[in-house]
Amino acid sequence: VAEVINFLVECFSHFAKAGKPQARTNPGLEKVTPILEYIQDHLDEPLTTASIAEAFYMSKHYLCHLFKEHTGFSLIDYVINCRVLKARGLLRQGMRVQEAGERSGFQSNEHFIRTFKKLTGFTIFQYINMLKIQKACELLHNTQKSITDIAMECGFNSAMYFGRTFKATLGLTPTEYR
């Protein structure tokens, strides 16, 4: 279920960023595109059903009904999934966990960490390590840098810890992967 929601969130994120051309092909999407854009533009702010409804001069009930009818999921689920998607992007850029959560609109670090795990299936620590391992794989494949240099460049404190984490993640040592 979380994978399907993540896929839908990414699709709607693209629609919201692209704007009207896609909305013309789907009349239902045209009705909610301004709402999708509003959510994207205000993710770092406290967003509630009431605040979004107020911004569009409609009742909370009608907003929720309209959104669910044309997107297939609830308004708040969409907001939360967008926040996690934004946080994932910020973490990929190397932002600290707490700052990524705050910039994505989570009011507390604990809520961010719990929600991230619930929706992605990974703890934030596991996700960051996967990003580091992904970068390491690219460096191992495309450069002749030493394992130690790659470990340090990817943010690991030691080559030994890097090797253990790499093997635990991929089932191969960095040398075997190379």
Image (cartoon, rainbow, N blue to C red):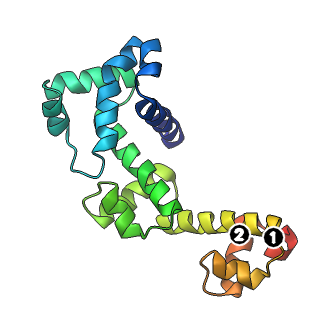
Of discs 1 and 2, which sits in the foreground?
1
Q: Tell me the distance, in whole angstroms, between the alpha carbons under discs 1 and 2.
A: 10 Å
Which picture quadrant has residue 51?
Answer: top left
Using the rendered image of the protein, determine whether residue 162 is visible from the camera's viewpoint.
no
Which residue type does callout 2 highlight?
Ala
x then y, percent, for residue 147: 77, 81
All told, the count of numbered labels is 2
N-term-proximal mark, 1 vs 2: 2
x then y, percent, for residue 121: 51, 54
Going by the image, does 176 lie left or right of 127? Answer: right
Badge 1 element: loop
Establish if 90 lies above or below 78. below
Establish if 132 lies above or below 158. above
Going by the image, does 23 lie left or right of 150? Answer: left
x then y, percent, for residue 160: 71, 86
User: In the drawing, what numbered circle is on residue 136?
Assistant: 2
Residue behind mark 1: 143
Q: Residue at x 70, y 85 (%)?
A: 159
Q: Residue at x 34, y 41 (%)?
A: 40
Using the rendered image of the protein, determine whether residue 136 is visible from the camera's viewpoint.
yes
Which picture quadrant has residue 176?
Answer: bottom right
Q: Residue at x 48, y 55 (%)?
A: 89
Going by the image, does 141 lie left or right of 64? Answer: right
Q: Quadrant of the C terminus?
A: bottom right
Badge 2 element: helix
Establish if 1 lies above or below 172. above
Which residue type does callout 1 highlight?
Thr
Going by the image, does 140 lie left or right of 48? Answer: right
In front of the other: 18 or 77: 18
In front of the other: 156 or 42: 42
Establish if 117 lies above or below 169. above
x then y, percent, for residue 46: 21, 50
